[in-house]
Every structure is written in C-alpha cells, then in structure tokens.
Amino acid sequence: MSDPYTKALAAIDAAHALDPTKTTTTTNEEIPYELHYAQKCTSYLEQRSPNSPDHLRLAIRAQHFRRWEVPRASYPMTRPGYHAWRTYLKKRQAELVQEICLQSGYDEEFAQRVGSLIRKEDLKKDEETQILEVPEDSTTSPVSLSTMTPRFFPRPVGRSLRERSPNAGPPENAPEHVDNVLR
C-alpha cells in the first residue's frame, strides 16, 4: 500500500466503515451505510467513465465523508437550515479529505482539486463537478435511487426528473421499484 491513491482510498474507506448506520447489500451482507454508498458511487463512476483521474475517483468516494457525525437534525428543519447543513458538510468533508490526500503523499494542488470537487465548486462549468452533482450526469441521483427502498417513493417522480433533464431515467440494472417510479 505504497502509492498515494491506495493510501487515500484505504483511509477514506476506514472512515466510512465507522458509520453506525448499517445497510444490507444485495448479497445479504450487512455493512456500514456510507461504505456501501461510496462503493456504489465508485461503481457508477467506473461504468460511466472508467478512465477517470485519481482526484475524481477520490472525490466521488468521499463526497459523504463522515456525514453521519453532523446529523441533519443539528440544523433547523427549514429550507435555509438544510442549505446551511449541506454547505457546512461540503466544507468540512473537503477539509478532512484534503488532509487525507496530503498525508497519503499527494501534493497541495491535488488535495485542493479533490476538495474543490467535494465542495461542488464551479458546478455550471466544471465537467468533473457535474459528474458528482448534475442530475443527468450524477453519481448521487442514480446511486441514491438504486439504494432506496420502495417506502421512499410515495408517488412516481419520473415526471419531475424528466423536467430537469430530458435524459433522466433509471440507471442500468435499476431495481424494479426505481424503474417503476421513474416512468
């Protein structure tokens, strides 16, 4: 484990493994939720863009880094409260992961780029940031949908997704409940 990417990935996954919330995988294995989510994000990126640079691969893996430590309920349950929570999380997650990158042997410029991606900076112009965030190119939209259970879908959401993007739709091999709500 001598190369910087392997070191950084191991440190990120070690933190994800501390998530007290568990989820059950399709193979009936119980694992920490954030580790499962990060693995799904990586899998999606590998399918979408198999030759992605290390900074994008690490940013995708770490975009919810230690998120459970700052519960949503610690901020007002309002729209401004939600945005304040998300803004704080992005800043915190970026700082923590930048430090991991530096400790793993990457230079400051590389660490800053990973942080910039995690903070979702320059979303409208930066294609790599868009891979993390924009609905039609997002890792979070298809990954979140593919990990949710039917109880999260009180009604079909396909129309609202199509309004945001004409190309919106379920990820390949999406569970049936995801495919059904996206029609």
Image (cartoon, helix red, strand yellow):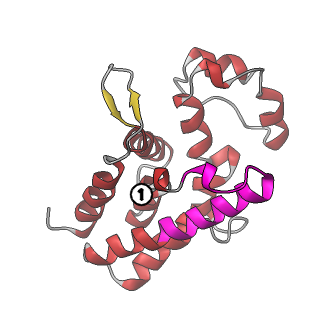
The magenta span reads: 71-94
Disc 1 element? helix
Specify whether residue 72 is painted magenta.
yes
Q: Residue at x 41, y 76 (%)?
A: 111
**Residue placed farthest to the bottom in the image?**
108
Q: Residue at x 62, y 18 (%)?
A: 150
Q: Nearer the viewer, residue 69 or 17?
A: 69
Q: Where 119 sits versus 164, above or below?
A: below
Is residue 13 rendered magenta in the image?
no
Q: Is residue 71 above or below residue 103?
A: above
**Within the image, what quadrant is residue 15 found in?**
bottom left
Residue 37 position by quadrant? top left
Instruction: State which quadrant residue 76 falls in.
Output: bottom right
Q: Which residue is mark 1?
A: 57
Q: Quadrant of the C terminus?
A: top right
What amino acid is found at the position of numbered circle 1 in the picture? Answer: Arg
Screen quadrant of the N terminus = bottom left
**Residue drawn at 52 percent across, 30 percent down:** 147
